[in-house]
Amino acid sequence: MRRLFAVAVVGVLLLAGCGDDDETTETGGESTGTTAMGDMPGMSEEDHAKMGDAKCEPSGTALSIVASDTKFDKDCLAAPANQEVTISYENKDSRGHNLVVLKSHTSSDVIARADIFTGPDTVTLDVPAQPAGTYAFHCEVHPQAMMGTFVVK
């Protein structure tokens, strides 16, 4: 009987940890909560830099990305160095998502952020000019499932 009770308690604790993964809340137009992904297993700065390989080349200053089924349609966005960029961000999910561009996956230094919104809807995110380098983007609501590299060349 004691063993059954212990198993039940562990099960309840595990289920509590599997609830909605919305760690980020929106208050007064600003998102709060976890921004950096420093505690993400398997994503080192070196891995982050490798994601921005030659397959992701800038093709202008108007970019687009789509969220559907709690994932992005691409894992790399590329922009020309020292030019402002606009990202058309379409959320096809009825769940809330956003898009944030960061200095790196382990950084909390935000370059640009779109507010959390539910779909279907599209917003435009203005990203200020950045020097050449490898940056990161993710959804603050689902950072481990929805992330990618922002390459500036």
Image (tube, helix red, strand yellow):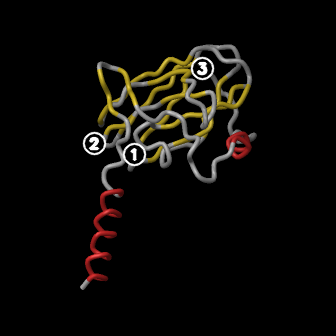
Q: Amino acid at mark 3?
A: Thr
Q: Amino acid at mark 2?
A: Ser
Q: Which quadrant, please, contains the C terminus?
A: top right
What residue sits 28% from the left and 42% below the top?
94
Instruction: Kindly state the secondary structure of the residue where label 3 is placed.
Output: loop
> Which residue carries the number 1 mark?
68
Spot occupied by residue 92 in the image (x, y as percentages of width and height): 34, 40
Front disc: 3 or 1:
1
Picture residue at 66% right of the left edge, 18% below the top: 130
Tell whether label 2 touches label 1 (CB within 8 Å). no
The percent position of residue 2, horizontal first and vertical second, equals 27, 82
- The answer for how far apart the CA atoms under marks 3 and 1 are is 23 Å
**Tag nearer the camera, 3 or 2:** 2
Question: Against 90, is 74 above or below?
Answer: below
Q: For the point 30% across and 58% down, which residue is it?
A: 16
| Labels 1 and 2: the sequence-earlier one | 1
Tell me the SS state at disc 1: strand
Q: Amino acid at mark 1?
A: Ser
Residue 31 position, x and y percent, is 38, 26
Q: Which mark is residue 61?
A: 3
Q: CA distance from mark 3 to mark 2?
A: 28 Å
Q: Residues within 10 Å of mark 2 (few under 14, many from 20)?
A: some
Label 1 – label 2 distance at C-alpha: 9 Å
Q: Is residue 128 above or below residue 152?
A: above
Q: Is residue 86 above or below residue 9?
A: above
Residue plotted at (70% across, 46% down): 47
Do the numbered discs 3 and 2 sit on residues whose CB atoms are within 8 Å?
no
User: Which secondary structure lies at badge 2?
Assistant: loop
Q: Quick one: 16 or 115, which is closer to the camera?
A: 16
Which residue is tagged 2? 94
